[in-house]
Amino acid sequence: MGFPVIRQRRLRASAELRRLVCQTKVSVDDLVYPLFTCPGKGVKEPIASMAGCFHFSPDRIAEEAAEVASLGIPAVLLFGLPEQKDESGSEAYAEDSTVCRAIRQIKKAVPELLVITDVCLCAYTDHGHCGLIKDGKIDNDPTLELLAKMALAHAQAGADMVAPSDMMDGRIGKMRSVLDAAGFSDTPIMSYAAKYASAYYGPFREAAHSAPEEGDRKSYQMDPGNSREALREMELDLEEGADILMVKPALSYLDIICRVADAFDVPIAAYNVSGEYMMVQAAAEQGLIDRDAVLMETLISIKRAGADIIITYFAKDAARVLRG
């Protein structure tokens, strides 16, 4: 039996009728809001490259987290900036890092809000790459030790979930074994499993001060032309212990979201990244589009493709639209 056809051709269909027959719906429960924490005290500083987003020092970030929770958004994804960068990104895995202090503040103020932490070295290394460098190449296996230490530090600080975004080979298995050995077997891992070497990351790299000093990340992030590789990467991450798989970016990779949602019976996340966000913001600022309508259409397209979780800088705006 096919989906019923609505025969009435009114000039304006009722909202109730539209809700009744709508096949794809975005809920506030689908959303994760990214947050940026930085060193210092009393800091709430606008991010120049990302309109409406801010850097928060750990003592101020709980205020933002409380607003996020009040809108019904279930989770935040936390990114951090270090006080100092060095060759090995040592602040990334320090027990008193900016991120660890921010986790504690958020969990103290809003214990019901899920705190997911990004696990990667790029914002902490002086060269801006996601792994250690040796002889001009990414040194994969020693990097795994540091990423696992970073994940453990976050879990010990109170993070509810860790999200490795580095794209090193074997990082999920290493992280899982270290977390399990330390008593954090219940801490899930959301893997950036299909993270493409995308040009859409520009505004974020400005925000996180994480652009590479030399070269690019094409040797360890995925080629935009590859789809079968995404399935292989995700299968490997699942075998190593990943609980949730992510596709990043979202809009230019809706086909990938669809393929992996069909292939794997686990939650699929998609990251509506900074470049996608700022294209909508810039067009709206010029009066070319209805911002709220476009942001909701964007999120619906990601959900329709098969994403269960949408990480987006539009989360607060979408929550307000859904309420209204």
Image: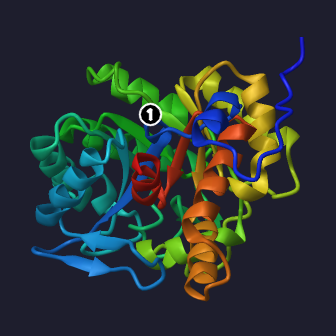
| Place of residue 98 in the rendered image (x, y in percent of width and height, measured from the top left) | 22, 61
Q: Residue at x 82, y 37 (%)?
A: 8
Q: Looking at numbered disc 1 in the image, what kind of residue is underneath it?
A: Met
Toward the viewer: 300 or 137? 300
Count of numbered labels shown in the rendering: 1
- Give the residue at mark 1: 175
Q: Is residue 76 left or right of residue 193?
A: left
The colour style of the image is: rainbow
Within-10-Å neighbours for mark 1: few <14, some 14–19, many 20+: many
Residue that extends furthest to the bottom in the rendered view of this protein = 286
Q: Nearer the viewer, residue 154 or 108?
A: 108
Give the image location of residue 101, x and y in percent: 16, 54
Image quadrant holding the N terminus, namely top right
Looking at the image, is 282 positioned above or below residue 189? Answer: below
Picture quadrant of residue 247: top right
Report the residue at 48% width, 32% height from top: 174
The residue sitting at 10% across, 43% down in the picture is 108
Which residue is pictured at 61% across the width and 50% down the height?
299
Horizontally, residue 232 falls left or right of residue 220, namely right
Name the side, left or right, on which 231 lies relative to 303. right
**One can see residue 12 in this view:** yes
Q: 189 above or below 60?
A: above
Query: Residue 134: where, in percent of width, then height?
Result: 57, 64
Q: Secondary structure at mark 1?
A: helix
Foreground pick, 193 / 84: 193
